[in-house]
Each structure stands twice: as C-alpha cells, then as structure tokens.
Image (cartoon, rainbow, N blue to C red):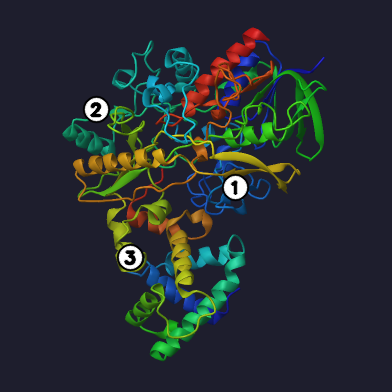
Amino acid sequence: MSKYDVIIVGAGAGGGVAAGVLAEAGKRVLLIERGRNLSFEDVGRDHLRNQRLSQYGHNAGPDINSNPRTLEVNGDERTIRPHEGGYHANAACVGSGTRVYGAQAWRFMPQDFRMASTYGVPKGSSLADWPITYDELAPYYERAEWEIGVCGSHDAMKHLPDYNKPYPMPPQSVHTQGRTFRNGAAELGWHTLPIPLLINSVPYNNRPACIRCQHCVGFACPVDAKNGTQNTLIQRALATGRCDLLTETMVERITTDSAGRVTGIAYFDKDGQRIEVTSEVIVLSAGAVETARLLLNSATSAEPNGIGNAGDQVGRSLQGHYYPGAVGLFPEPVHDGIGPGASTATCEFNHGNDGIIGGGMLADEFILLPIIFSKRTLPPDLPRWGAANKNFMRENYRRVSDIKGPVQDIPSYDARVTVNQKVRDRWGIPVANLSGTTHPETVRTANFMHERAKEWVKASGAVKVWGAPPGLFLSGGQHQAGTARMGDDPQSSVVDKWSRVHGHDNLYIADGSVHVTNGGFNPVLTILALSFRTAEHIAQNW
Amino acid sequence: MLSAHQTEILRAAVNRIIPPDDFPGGWEGGVGDYLSRQFKGDLKDLLDTYRVGLDALDAESQAAIGTGFALANAEAQDSLLTQIEHGSVKTTWPIDPESFFSMMIDHSMEGFYSDPGNGGNRDQIAWKMIGFEVRG
C-alpha cells in the first residue's frame, strides 16, 4: 500500500489549495515543491532581482543556474536562464506566485467561459468554450475569496452576476492616484470599482491588516497581510498532520504501470538522489509551462507522445496576457506613497467592444520601484541621460502614473511548449522549449485597449500621455495558462470538466494549464477556485 | 579591476550621465560603489568591455578636443558623449560606441536608483531626491 493517497506536484496557487482541501478531507498528501520555503528576509527587497524586475536574478526562484529553457524564434533556438527575457518565469517557492504577487482577485465573467460562442473562432485560432459555466464555478470563487481572503466591494462588481456573499473584507481606503483616476472615469461616464485584492484590509485569519507599504507586488509582505497559499491552505494542510511538504525537490516524470496507468512519480531530492513514490492519485500544479513539460517528459509505450497527448494538445495554446497601457504626467503629485498602489479598475471594456474580440480590464498601477520607473516608464522623448533626465526623475516621479490591464488572449495552436531533448536541466531532464506567438487578433484587441487607456489617462487630467501599442509576440509569463485545456472531447482538449486528464482515472491538473481561455483579468482567483472544485471532486471520488 | 586612470574616466562619464546639482552626481551617489561590487558579480564578464570602452572614450576625447576625457570640462564632455550616443565618432572603436554608452547609462541608473543593498544609492539619496518612501 502506498504511503500517500495523493501526490501534488507544485506548491503554488493550485497545488496549495488542493493540498489543504485533500488533507482536511482525510487524505494522506505529499506536496512537492522545487523551490524553497522562503521567509520575508529570504525574499528581501532587492530592486534588481525580483519578480517585477529580474535584471540579474529572482528573489523567489527559480534558481537561475539550474533551470534553463530554450526559446525558438523564426527557427533560431536560444538557451535562456529564468531571469532572462522570453523565459516566461513564474516564482518557484512555497506559495509560488502567491508569495510575491500583486494579489488581484478577479473572477472571470460569464462570457469569458463562452468565447467561441460569443465571438466565433477567428481563422487560425484555437479559441473554444469552456465545458463549465461561470455559475458552476461561482461557489468556488466564493470559497477562494473567503478561505484565502479577499478585500473588495461586491456591490461594485456590476460586470458580474450578483454575489451570494459579499467579500469578507471591505476595500482599502482610496489614495490620491485612485481618486484621480476615479474622477477621470466619471468624466468619461465609465463605472469604476475598487480592485478586489487578496490582501487584508482589516485583520483577518489571525493576521494583521496591510500597512500600505511600497514594496507589494514582486515582494513578500512585511506583516504577512498578503494572502497566498503559503499562509492559508498549505498551513491548513500541514496542521492536519497528514501532509508532507518536500521542498527543493524536482519531479522528473510521472510513473506508470505496464498498461500505462499512472502509479506515482519519480523525483530528485535535495541531494540529487532519484526516488520513486506511489499514490492513488496524482495532481499536477507546476504551472502551464512546467506541467506541460512534465506530461511530455512522461511518455510511455501506451502514450508515446506524452501523457494526455493523444489529441496533440499538450503544450499548445499557451496564453498569458498582453498588458497595453498609457502613462500620464499630471500637474500635481498623484503618488502619495500609499501602497500597494493599484486601487481602481474599470470593466467597461471586457466585452461588447464593436468589431473587437473580447477586451480586458484596465486599472491603475502598483507603486513603481524607482529603477523600474527609470528603465521603463519615462517618456520616449526624454533624453536618457544628463540633467534633463535627472530633473525629470526628481520633479515627476510623484506626478507620473499609468493605466494598464490584461487583454484576453486569443489563443493560437502554435503558441507552444514542447520539450527539447538536446538541452537538459541540472537534473538531466529535457527542458521546456517555447515557440510561436499569440493570434494576431490579440494584438488588435490590445491596440483597442491601449487607446482606452490613453483616453482614461487624458480624462484624468494628464498634461502629457505616452506609451506605445504592442506588437505580436508569445504571451505566457506569470499569467501562463492554456497548455492542458479543459474540454469534453479528448481530441481537442487534455482534461475533462473535472480537470482529470482524458484517458486516465487518477491524474488531475490544478493550475492555469486547464484554462481554455484566460479572461481579461489576472487569472489567480480562477486557478484557486478551480483547484477547490477539482480537489473537492477528488475527495468525493477517491 | 579597472586601472586608476580608467576609473577616473568612468567617474567623469557617470557624473555627466547623472550630473551633480544640489543632489550628488551619480558617482558620489553610489554608482562607483555599485559598479565596483558588480564588477566582481553580475557584471564580471563586462569588465573587459568597460576597459576597452573607457580607453576608446579617452582616445576619442584626445582626438576630438586634445585632452583626456576626465580632464575635459563638463560642456566638452557632454558634447562628446552626445556624439558617441549617436554613433558619430572620429576614432576607430574596437567595440560599438553607441552600445557601450547605452550600457553605461543602464548601469549608472541601476547604481543610483536601485536599493542600497546593491551597493549604490548611498543613504537612499536618490529615493529622497525623487520622493520614494520606504515603510515596513
């Protein structure tokens, strides 16, 4: 008999929730994480090595010397390290992205689950409907909001059906930047709402309220008021005594019996020793790139192209988000030093845009680190050096603010994760290879949203507005999704409506991979909600 | 490491990229400390490029105005750097002058505006200057 009922690969948003739900349901759980369990001090406040600016490395993994990927652009292949452009990194630590995220807690809209029916499928796109509806997921959104902890105003979410329950915490108070953009939107007749955040606006869950510091997105919280899986569901899992957490542990492959049925996994422990462990059920929650890589690296004689890949869908339709926006210079300071910064959004343009497929949410930006401001946000006509540059920094750091937001990706089959047999990571495992781009319709939608961002910044009183519309590239990044999409037909999807891999009774996925489409919103609340639903299903059926 | 002469050229260039006013110039604001630390770390592989680039900058200065870069006055230094920024040089550079200057700008900004934990931004002087506060 196996020591474990369930093995979960990856202790991020999806894996953390699954561990908590399953351990509390009485299952013996092994939760495996390739990164470390990081303290606040471990994450630190390095402005050149963080999830917002990874100039020379990362503060929350993955380790830059052990985890290469390859990137294929126009037939040229390059090997890249995790902090380099094109890698599409997500944090690798206990809690993963939820340890260091900006914590925006958006539900997708009902239309986001029905993109193909709503808009039709553009030529060359893999756009499809989800096999589940918003209404099926709504109770699990609510669980995520209450059990992990969201502040916000449910009354203000006019783009969504009515909530059954309000958020457990009220929104944060509005600062100058938020007020400025709320006034601007009012001029335009646009409805705005407080951004729902997985942050304690008041004490919650035995942890204190946010102190409104300036190092939120990209960093860990100094008072533990930012809610991720590392301080909620993973703690609950460990408290049952039924969950073992292994860190700095790299999973090599899924193991199977001679008939191809999944039996467990093989991993390398901290010391590099290869170990096989069995369980009744396996849950993959390594993120859209690494989960696809693991399925592809686990080919068997029954499934020579990778587990769950009978329909040639594993790794395809990689999605993330374009982030078009506009920056404005205001006559008075708009930055009052009150974090996290992002406060105010509009959902006027997520759907219903004439001649455009989908759209996205727009919101004000987190407090910008000064070096990010210098590198990425200055007006293009400003000299890059000299007195003019220094004066602009000095006079206008507090007068500049920007609006941006995630655009619903229109997926492409060619935006793709494969494995590269020629390039191996530190453990000798073939690495992920990334290739392709999103569908050109995404660019058209992103350009439309760029214009709306400019309008909003202007209407809010900016005396100068800048920012360029985006071109065509591969999306993924921290919002990576779509590489093991959900569907009823095994030929056009990888998992069924319970996130179980087609053709397997005991292999599930709990991360953004299963998203058929990725909404015009930060996807984490959807990942959390789906994992609650999947884990509950596993608990009831195993 | 860089020679004393190369360091003087670098200091002069950094102090034109971020010139002193009532707040310190880039070098005194911590860029020099940042770079000397990074030359042993992330920028180790670029040390040779810096050596070659700084020598070329000095030679360019000699050719253009008859004096070494560090000894030229601020206006002359600015005008020389502006030429280099646009790739218009009189001497033959062993490396691309525009890229070299662009790299110096990037590293100067990192040393001045990033966190003091990276060795620069002495006493958070750049943050005080622009109004970036740190709480918690």
Q: Chain of mark 1?
A: A
The answer to which of marks 1 and 2 sits earlier in the sequence is: 1
Q: Residue at x 35, y 70 (%)?
A: B20
List x then y, in percent, for residue A135. Answer: 43, 13
In the rendered structure, which amino acid carries the disc numbered 1?
Pro
Q: Which residue is mark 3?
A: A383
Quarter of the picture containing the C terminus of chain A is: top right
**Residue A476 percent coordinates (x, y):** 51, 39
Q: Nearer the viewer, residue A236 or A224?
A: A236
Q: Amino acid at mark 3?
A: Pro
Q: Element under label 1?
A: loop
Residue at x-position 35% and y-position 77%: B78
Locate residue B131, reporting x and y percent. 33, 51
* Position of residue A478 in the picture relative to residue A177 (left or right): right
- To which residue does mark 2 refer? A191
Check disc 3 and report its element: helix, strand or loop.
Answer: loop
Name the chain under label 2: A
Residue B35 in the image, given as x and y percentages of width and height: 53, 66
User: Please, which residue is most extreme toward the bottom here?
Assistant: B66
Q: Is residue B4 above or below residue A448?
A: below
